[in-house]
Structure formats: structure tokens, C-alpha cells
Image (cartoon, rainbow, N blue to C red):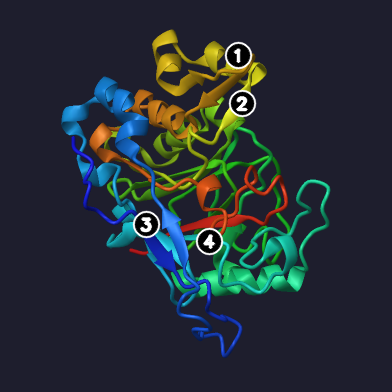
Amino acid sequence: MHFKADRAACDTLDVGKDYNKNNTGVIMNSNNLGRIVRKDNERLFYNIFKTYGMADIKESNYIDTIHLYNEPVPHIKFAPFEKSSFVSQCFSTRLGGVSSGMFKSMNLTFNKVGSYEADLRDNVMENFRRMGKVINTPVEDMVYSKQTHTNNVLYVDDSNRGMGIVKDRNYDNIDGLVTGTKELTLVTSFADCIPVVMADEKSRCIASVHAGWRGTVGNIVKNAINMMTDKFGSNSCDIIAFIGPGICVDCYEVSQDTINEFRKNYSQSECELIIQPENKPGKYLLNLPGADYINLINAGVRPENIYLSDVCTSENSDILFSHRASSGRRGIMCNFIKIIN
């Protein structure tokens, strides 16, 4: 494994575009470019790769795994799904929407954020419509999770179309969604927590989960895979999994209480791979994507079928919403995925 020294260190998005003008976008300042800074995943995950099957892992599993596009609004595609004939997927940025203030501009939550008042509903609806154009989905065909940092996963079908966006949900406390229904778009939300998105073309089902530290330590990934197996007969060795943009280990300082929960649920050797003591009493750096990687491996997903984002939300808070980087003054990004064929 060799990290490519001559590879592009970052990508750009046109933050100088006015996406409100004719809904097409006009360059306002050619120098006003947002720069996505990528992480050295070989450094961050080397020991994990070495432990769980380095021989089976290619650079394409962990380098340049997300691709950025400006049209019709800025968005991210995950490499293993980008050219798929089975699914269509996209992940929003904080750019290209109509929201203002701390929600500027592609905010995708109708809810209050901490103690701050909610965004205007009309703005959020317009933002969802814009993201719907990216994935060619009307908002009526989306189903939105109701996340409360649980490890709960819900099976959804045609009866859930539009829930959480254009009609009320009939569920609560749901951080993961699973479906086998064609053209039903699963929507899950993020602002540092880890997206884990899975697809099994053989069994024709998909899953999208929100894995914060509570969901990760509670193994929401395994719960989603179990549901894919129970509902569709999915075999974990056939699942393609993507661990999406979230906070990296370099930026994720946690307290002793959080570490204690991981030590209860992970083996000593696993904890050594994901926990780094800091030079402060009771403070640690936690590799949350690494913990989700271990969860996927332990659930039977093959190393060669697991892909890792090389982008940290906290280090790219001008382009991506980050709870930590903004001290809680932020909007929400979403992942969108649907079965198309």
C-alpha cells in the first residue's frame, strides 16, 4: 500500500455560484472556490487494514472514494455506487440551497438544532426539491429517518413514501432505513456522525444508517445487515458498504465516559485500533469510522467490499456541515439512495 504523493490534495466546488438565479447557477467570482481537503486514510487506517485483510484491499477502497459535482447543485457521489445500474446515490453539501444564517444554505432539517430555532419550512422544502433533482426523485418518493442516536433500524416500503418530508411519520427513534422497494429514496441526515450506506444487488435491497458514537457502539450496522438478511435473504458477503464523510479521528476528542462504552462492547485488541489516549487526563481521540469498519467486518462484510470516505466534515466545515467545527450552529446534510433497476 502506497499513498500517492502526486495525487490531487483537494477538490473544488463552486461556492461562488448563485444557485438562486434562474436555478441554474452563475459564477460570481472565479476565485471563490471551496476546497475539499482529503485525509491520508493509509495513515488513519493502516493498522485496521493490516488486521482485517490488507491483501484484499485496494487503494480504490480508501483513496478518492468520493467524487464532487457542481450541477444541478453541489453534491457528492460515493464511488462504488456512482456507475451502478442497481442504485442511485448522492450526498448533499452545505452549498446550493436557499437557507440563510447558520443554516446557509443547503440545510435539510425541519427541526430545531439544539437551542436554536428551526429553519423556515419553505426553505427546507426547496432544498429537498433541489436535491431531488440531483437524484431524479420527487420529494413525495422520499422517506426520512427520525434520528435520535439509537441503533434502531426500520424496514420501509411504498406505504412510507413521503414520510418525514411531505407527510407525518408513523415512526420515531429510527436511525437506519432498509428497503427493497424500487424508486423509494432513503434519506438519512448527518453533521459529523458517520453515514454507512449498503447495497446488495443480488438480494435487491439497500440500507442507509446514521452511526453516531451511540449507534456505533450499539452496532446499528449489524442491525441493518440483520434486517437485510431477515427481509431479503441477504448474505453479508454480497453487501457493498460505504462509510461516508464524517468526523475523523484527528478531530474527534471524547471523554472517559464515551471510551468506557466502547471498552464494554469492543475487545481489547479492537479498542487498541480505534482509541488513542491524549495528553490530557480523561481525554481520547476516537476513530469512529474505524469502529464502523470493524462492525462491518464482524458482520461478515468482505474487506474488499468496504469503502471509506477520505473526507472529514470537521476539516471541511466551509463546504460540509460540522457540529464540532461550528459549536452546534449548523444545518444538516443528507444521504439519498434508491433502487433504480
Cα distance in 3D space between marks 3 and 4:
15 Å
* Sequence-first tag of 3 and 2: 3
* Sequence-first tag of 4 and 1: 4
* Sequence-first tag of 4 and 2: 4
Cα distance in 3D space between marks 1 and 3:
36 Å
Q: Which residue is mark 3?
A: 10
**For the residues bearing labels 4 and 2, Cβ distance under 8 angstroms:** no
Q: Is residue 150 left or right of residue 58?
A: right
* Sequence-first tag of 1 and 3: 3
* Sequence-first tag of 3 and 4: 3
- At x 71% / y 72%, what residue is drawn? 123
* Label 4 secondary element: loop
For label 4, count other residues whose C-alpha is less than 10 Å away and answer few (under 14), some (14-19) or many (20+): many
Residue type, mark 2 in image: Val
Residue type, mark 3 in image: Cys
Disc 1 or disc 3, which is closer to the eye? 3
Q: Is residue 293 left or right of residue 224?
A: left
For label 2, count other residues whose C-alpha is less than 10 Å away and answer few (under 14), some (14-19) or many (20+): some
Indicate whether 316 appears above or below 233. Answer: below
Q: Which residue is mark 2?
A: 254
